[in-house]
Amino acid sequence: MSVDAAEPVSSRRRVPRTDHVMADPRLVEAVGRLGSATVKAAVHEAQDHARRGIIDPGKVADFAVTKLPVRPSSLRPVLNATGVVLHTNLGRAPLGPAAIEALVAASGYTDVEFDVRTGARAGRGRATIEALLRTVPAAEAALVVNNGAAALLLATTALAAGCEVVVSRGEMIEIGDGFRLAELIASTGARVREVGATNRTNLSDYATAMGPATGCILKVHPSNFKIDGFTSSVPVADLVALGAPVIADIGSGLLAPNPLLPDEPDVTRTLGAGAALVTCSGDKLLGGPQAGLILGDAATVGELRRHPLARALRVDKTTLAALEATLAGPDSPIALYLNARPERLLERAERLAQAVGGEVVPSMGAVGGGSAPGTELAGWAVALPARIAPLLRRGDPCVVARVHHGRCMVDLRCVPEASDAALLGAVLAVVE
Ligand SMILES: *Cc1c(COP(=O)(O)O)cnc(C)c1O
């Protein structure tokens, strides 16, 4: 607390003492929820306001209550009205109710490495692995790590440290935020052996590069861009015939073919083509928590599991719980949003537009998150003046919409229907 020496003593005296204010029942409750440092900071701010005559000294506790954060973390829930299903800046896949329930249940003490029947230690994450293998019968074994990049790191380290990873020049992608695949692999102690040209790589390009130094072949799905025109790449099945183990990084985490996304590779078919390992993310099309999945033959996955690096990349108990529930449970929010019926989106958009005075316009949603580039999802949005967008972001609930051609487009695809009323309230609060 800062005390201004020039301030009259009388006004300083009238400001209630910190311990006195902290005894207010609302603040006592807040200490239990938010911690005493956070509550004290709000009280000090209120005392400072009283000292400077901005508020009445009798209102210090009331004012401090208004300055308390709404929730214990600064991360706030967002209504995603962008129409982009996997929005990297908005945390990729939102978890569904089953995954959230599982996550909360596992967040205290839990039997993550304990068998309650025998009282003995048990394999960490065993039920999650079983759920994964039930969903992908083509895989003999599976492993879960921190994210897709970690999966790739572990796979290339275990199969090619000190050796070469043979990879097509057209697949040397940057996965986002300045992270490049080649640099990730080089950091493991493996050498990247690029083959082919940016637009075309043939089987013979791989064959000539291979030799005693080859640790593995890496096939990467260029998930966040699309090259059209004079292109060619080599399918996994042909690479497998070259003899070295093939790691396929499919990125998006589609476990089985999805007719809506015909160009997205999936784990089942990629394993069927003979890949030794398939890696992908858990929080893209799979719709689960941030995780990296590694599926493949038992011997190779076992080698990865025993690698010292595996311990550094392991996932938290809450991730294991949320992933298991996503795999075993009902359709994830991602699946619901991808498959949202345009007629239903239109009905919801019309209801919102009527209430707030906007215009209903066709809107192309996107898969996003570096998945299915070029795939457009036909839907509807409510168009409002562009100046509404920043107001919606700063509102409560926070609504993130898209500004397109000078208009603020509120797309309902990724807004849960149960939140339509909250969305309406948020828009009404900022349109006049
Ligand atoms: C998204 C992606 C990654 C990175 O996965 P994270 O889960 O973000 O670490 C790696 N490779 C491909 C092909 C991807 O699409």
Image (cartoon, helix red, strand yellow):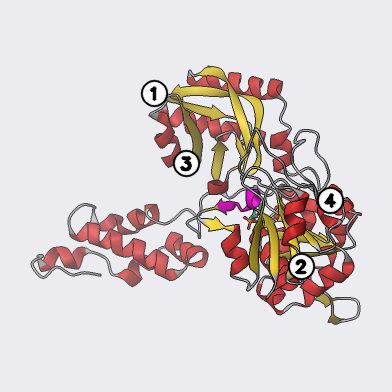
Gap between marks 4 and 2 measured at Cα? 17 Å
Q: What kind of residue is marked 3?
A: Asp
Residue annotated with mark 4: 238
Among the two numbered marks 3 and 2 on one chain, the one whose residue lies closer to the N terminus: 2
Secondary element under disc 4, as helix, strand or loop, is helix
Residue annotated with mark 3: 396
Q: Quadrant of the N terminus?
A: bottom left
Region of the chain picked out in magenta, as a range: 169-175
Q: What kind of residue is marked 4?
A: Asp
User: Which class describes the residues within 10 Å of circle 4: few (<14), some (14-19), or many (20+)?
Assistant: few
Among the two numbered marks 3 and 1 on one chain, the one whose residue lies closer to the N terminus: 3
Q: Nearer the viewer, residue 282 or 103?
A: 282
Q: Position of residue 289 (x, y in %)?
A: 68, 55
Residue annotated with mark 1: 432
Q: Position of residue 114 (x, y in %)?
A: 82, 77
Among the two numbered marks 4 and 2 on one chain, the one whose residue lies closer to the N terminus: 2
The answer to whether residue 311 is above or below residue 165 is below
Secondary element under disc 1, as helix, strand or loop, is loop
Residue 211 got which mark?
2
Secondary element under disc 3, as helix, strand or loop, is loop
Give the residue drawn at x 28%, y 70%: 17
Residue 157: quarter of image:
bottom right
Q: Which mark's residue is nearer the viewer, 1 or 2?
A: 2
Q: Nearer the viewer, residue 398 or 331?
A: 331
Q: Marks 3 and 4: in contact by CB < 8 Å?
A: no
Gap between marks 1 and 2 measured at Cα? 70 Å
The answer to whether residue 296 is above or below residue 341 is below
Q: Position of residue 75 (x, y in %)?
A: 51, 54
Is residue 170 rendered magenta in the image?
A: yes
Among the two numbered marks 1 and 4 on one chain, the one whose residue lies closer to the N terminus: 4
The answer to whether residue 224 is above or below residue 190 is above
